[in-house]
Image: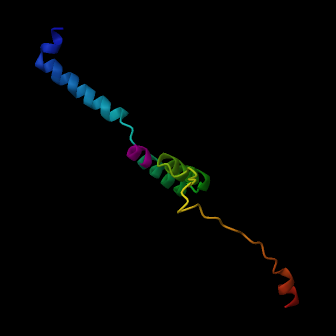
Amino acid sequence: MRLFRNEKVLNRVAELQAEQAKLYAVTIESLTEQLREDRQLAYSVKNPSAAVSAVMGMARLHGLDKQVISADPVNPPSLINIAIVDNTAKRLNG
């Protein structure tokens, strides 16, 4: 093609491609920044649910929403035992 031998045409094509790359560049960093802005907006309009959604979106984006199960015998997963203690009788009997 003759047009692509023309230096002005090649420069303009490169310029347009660079503009399009900027428009459609989606990175983890850009998405994180958008979610931070969304979270701030949610706080400013007193919408805690939307703020939590933005935080969870960031967690998912960075892979922090996944449950990690270890099969490592040296560092096994921790177990947490929760005991419910009824102190009502002690408070009533004093």
Looking at the image, which residue is at 75% across and 72% down? 83
Residue 68 magenta-highlighted: no
Q: How is the image coloured?
A: rainbow
Q: Which residues are magenta?
A: 28-32
Which of the pair 62/27 is nearer the observer? 62
Q: Is residue 72 left or right of residue 31?
A: right
Find residue 30 and report its horizontal and vertical position in percent.
39, 44
Q: Is residue 17 left or right of residue 52?
A: left
Which of the pair 38/55 is nearer the observer? 55
Residue farthest to the front?
73
Residue farthest to the bottom?
94
Looking at the image, which residue is at 31% across and 35% down? 22
Find residue 79 and report its horizontal and vertical position in percent.
64, 65
Q: Is residue 23 above or below residue 75?
A: above
Q: Is residue 89 left or right of residue 22?
A: right
Residue 31 magenta-highlighted: yes
Q: Quadrant of the C terminus?
A: bottom right
Find residue 92 and report its horizontal and vertical position in percent.
87, 86
